[in-house]
Image: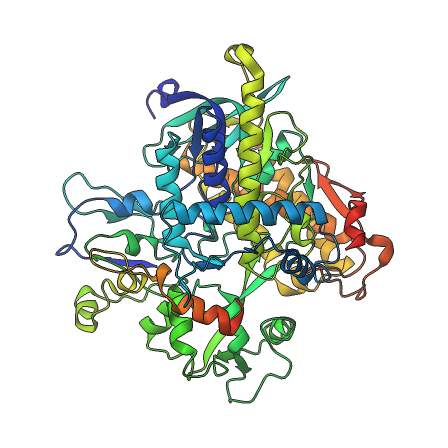
Amino acid sequence: MIEVISADRCIECNQCVSVCPTNVFDRADNGIPVIARQSDCQTCFMCELYCPVDALYVAPDSEGITGITEAELEEQGLLGGYREKVGWGKGRQPVASHDFMVKLAARAGF
Amino acid sequence: MSQPALKEALKLTADVLVIGGGPAGTWAALTAAAKGVKVILADKGYCGSSGATAPSGTGVWYVKPEEELREAAKASRYAMGGKLAEHRWMDRVLDRTYENMNRLGVSGYPFPVDEEGNPYRRGLQGPEYMRLMRKLVKKAGVKILDHSPVLELLADEHGVAGAAGVQTQNGEAWSVHAGAVVIATGGCAFLSKALGCNVLTGDGYLFAAEAGASLSGMEFSNAYAICPTFSSVTKTAYYSYASFYYEDGSVVEGAGSKKGRSVIARNLLAGRQVFAKLDGADEALQPLLRVAQTNFFLPFDRRGINPFKDLFPVTLRLEGTVRGTGGIRITDEQCGTGVPGLYAAGDAATRELICGGFTGGGSHNAAWAMSSGSFAGEGAAAYAAGLGRHSQHRAPVGLSSSPLVHQEVKAGEAARTAEYVEAVQAEVKPYDINLFRTEQGLASSLERLDGLWKEQRSREIQRTPEGVKAREAEAMTATARWMYSSALARTETRGMHKREDFKGSDDSQHHRLISGGLDQVWVKTEEVAKESVLL
């Protein structure tokens, strides 16, 4: 589930509020969005992907809260990792165009 | 809450209203708009991130128009699907999928290229695909209403004429009067947290049934995905490289990602945790797998698990009709439902026409979504255009089976909704009711589900985000009743529908099961088009 919004990184663009399919976030009048309905999070990672400044972290556990902190995330370099893999963000190549897709299909047939 | 009468702030009109902004809905909107009509698309969440397709990669049933290849493609799942697919529909969908995928390339989808420099178009990455679809839909002049779930359809004596709902981010009610409506709300995964599926609660089935449409193939509704116990990532294809073990490291005999899924289920039922590791993927394959399905590895990487070497506990997560094949019955080539002005597409519609009672993966569903979406969009646009100027003067009313109200409902309703959801889940999640079906299990479950429906259907539901959840609970209850009534009627094993008390398939039941009804659920048989038998 979504667990962390980094106040240091967040630029208050509210993109996460817009893109979350299950409406987990609320806009705040002054400040960063709040995780208002955490139990509605379906752990789909879409908010992380759309965050332009890698301020969000969705923990992999869909059934419970892990309690991971921003400091731990920074230390382990976990913020922004998914967006990098999908190849979204300035100067990146979208993974959709990766030639491994073709190679895998030749081997696996899916 | 002070002025309930003022809450209906948004009243719009359109020729075509599309409900749902996943692949089927966006293709419907695009093709309708291309016919020159005014289109509004309402999504429960956000068009671009909502639904089963957006979060991950999917194969696509993209086959070059060469006879041999096409025949092989059609035959590949025909028997597995219990021979309920239809030749003509498979042809149409293969043609339209081919056309649409090529169009995506022209529109800027970054397809990878093979060694000869030819684009490879047998797959799509969900985030990229749906971001592009949103862009194309907007460019086509379609008005998108995000975070705008539907509460009910609107209709008059001539047919369906719009829908009404609530905007979840500001609490305001909305309504759209439209000449035609396309339901593209996806299937029903019963809030099981299968990847991207919690917006898929069978709403469209309920709306269609309330308008008088019927369903087809609802017995093909027991898809379960292999998934780490802690995770939402339900991508079963990669488990073809997995071996399954008990905690002590001994092998679970017969367990597998395809036919061996029942072995996993029986172990889990008996209280024995099953573990997996992808030890069938050699080192050369591993980086390819990582790239093709990036979020498959996300939960492992974040937990410090190497899925190629380490054991991790797995479960079977319910995907219901999302990866099943049942849905709203289609009655013509435009994906009409038999109700004037009402069309259905994607997972909301039956997919039996192209894959019968079984769909092994996303590729058929993805092809069906973009094709049926296109058929429905064009059909709805033509229907709306044919209504002429009289369409301006319609005064349609809401079709919800429960009374929808503006004023506040009594306290404790939210908690009751949560109870109904849990009660339905307790009927559809258990493997010993839904996966391994028996007359006794289905009949006693149906009795409880009928009771749940009765309790809910006279409830007052407020036009608020909380009311949306109440309608979802009703939709899931109704869906489960059509599922189990159909499953009871099919006294054989066919496609994904498995009866423990009728293990073989029965030639005399080579037909479709149509279902419908709200207070009284009914099931009847329908012949499969004759030509399919020739295949």
Task: Decide which of B106, B219 is in the foreground and name it.
Answer: B106
Residue B97 visible in rendering:
yes
Q: Residue at x 54, y 29 (%)?
A: B181
Total marks drawn? 0
Task: Give above or below for B425 relative to B242.
Answer: above
Task: Give above or below for B88 relative to B74.
Answer: above
**Residue B393 position within the rendered picture, expressed as x and y whole percent measured from the top left:** 52, 10
Q: Residue at x 68, y 47 (%)?
A: B353
List the single residue furthest toward the right. Answer: B508
**Residue B31 position within the rendered picture, expressed as x and y whole percent measured from the top left:** 49, 34
List the single residue furthest toward the left. Answer: A8
Asked if residue B347 lies left or right of residue B353, the reply is left
Task: Give above or below for B398 relative to B485.
Answer: above
**Residue B284 position within the rendered picture, expressed as x and y whole percent measured from the top left:** 41, 81
Residue B402 visible in rendering:
no
Task: Decide which of B175, B366 is in the foreground and name it.
Answer: B366
Q: Quadrant of the N terminus of chain B?
A: top left
Asked if residue B84 lies left or right of residue B245, the reply is right
**Residue B506 position within the rendered picture, expressed as x and y whole percent measured from the top left:** 84, 59
Coloration of the structure image: rainbow
Task: Decide which of B254, B442 is in the foreground and name it.
Answer: B254
Asked if residue A63 lies left or right of residue B507, the reply is left
Q: Quadrant of the C terminus of chain B?
A: bottom right
Q: Residue at x 47, y 80 (%)?
A: B281
